[in-house]
Amino acid sequence: DALATMYVDRLAELGGECDFVTDVAIWYPLRVIMSILGVPEEDEPLMLKLTQELFGSSDPDTTRSFEMMEFMNVVGDFEDYFRKLTAARRANPTDDVASVIANATVDGAELPDHETNGYYIIIATAGHDTTSSSTSGGLLGLLQHPEQLMRLRQDLDRLLPTAVEEMIRWVTPVRQFMRTATEDYVLAGQKIRAGESLVLWYPSANRDEAVFSNPDRFQVDRADAKQLAFGFGGHVCLGQHLARMEISALFKELLQRVDHIELAGEPQYMQSTFVGGLKSLPIRYKLK
């Protein structure tokens, strides 16, 4: 809540016009997760840069290089950073998740570097990028559907939880994952054989007309406000509850304080076939 207030204050400081993605949406969840993880605030720009190079490797504005080895070098840079953080937290544990990971043991032994770095990297990337995409995409949904924005503002406390679910469904920042079938299965008349690889398209699932009424309509009071953006079962997103809290806190603060808000330019999307969302959302606004 305190960070949500701080970033709406930043909107006030920006004087009525800004790029909501680059000025607010990418920094707010980044600050939340890095404060939990234990990464110093001065290192957050590095974490953002590496995350964008990892997830935005297909976008000319964010990729380090289109060479595959450069993609692996991004992972290497993450590992170099977190190897040093592990050593620091083992020497001097503090009250953060980095200390938990660095000092964790399995059968009396410290975690190997590969597993330790894997925990760090997934928290330091998925812990903010998808939330920032849902936040900025959720605002765009409201701006493109002003009647829904008005409805939400008129009944904010009651409708905010379902509105957040609808924003996440609408954006679906994780586009796909690949899986391998472990047994033969028939789905909607299509036979899937054990050992075959298949792609799970999350945006398609979240617009399934067999599940959602008017799936292509953005609706803040949607009765069927369930969605699969966080995955399901053994692969469900560990940070889903934090993401909901962050989005809810920011929109509660913003919609209580904004008097008027509108688009001030053309939104732009990151080029990505895996994880992505808006990379620019120019807005014009007046706060109370």
Image (cartoon, helix red, strand yellow):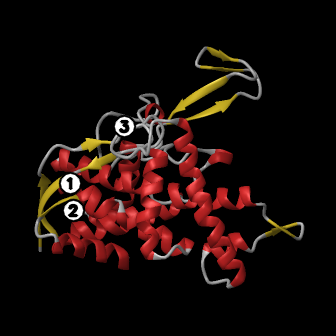
Q: Earlier in the sequence, mark 3 or mark 2?
A: 2
- Between residues 77 and 110, which one lies in front from this camera angle? 77
What number is the disc on residue 141?
A: none
- Asked whether residue 254 appears in the rendered view, the answer is yes
In the rendering, at what x and y percent does residue 83 appear?
66, 66
Q: Provide the secondary structure element on which disc 1 rests.
A: helix
- Between residues 278 and 190, which one lies in front from this camera angle? 278
Q: Residue at x 71, y 27 (%)?
A: 181
What number is the disc on residue 271?
A: 3
Asked if residue 202 lies left or right of residue 23, the reply is: right
- Amino acid type of the residue tagged 2 in the rendering: Arg
In the rendering, at what x and y percent does residue 15 appear?
11, 70
Q: CA distance from mark 1 to mark 3?
A: 28 Å
- Residue placed under numbered mark 1 in the picture: 149
Check the picture and name the quadrant holding the N terminus: bottom left
Q: Provide the secondary structure element on which disc 2 rests.
A: helix
Looking at the image, do the residues carrying marks 3 and 2 touch, with CB atoms under 8 Å apart?
Answer: no
- Amino acid type of the residue tagged 3 in the rendering: Gln
Looking at the image, do the residues carrying marks 2 and 1 touch, with CB atoms under 8 Å apart?
Answer: yes
Q: CA distance from mark 3 to mark 2?
A: 32 Å
Q: Earlier in the sequence, mark 1 or mark 3?
A: 1
Circle 3 residues within 10 Å: few <14, some 14–19, many ≥20: some
Q: CA distance from mark 2 to mark 1?
A: 6 Å
In the rendering, at what x and y percent does residue 121 appear?
59, 57
- As drawn, 68 above or below 61: above
What number is the disc on residue 153?
A: 2
Number of labelled discs?
3
Q: Residue at x 18, y 53 (%)?
A: 282
- As drawn, 69 above or below 120: above
- Asked whether residue 238 appears in the rendered view, the answer is no
Circle 2 residues within 10 Å: few <14, some 14–19, many ≥20: some
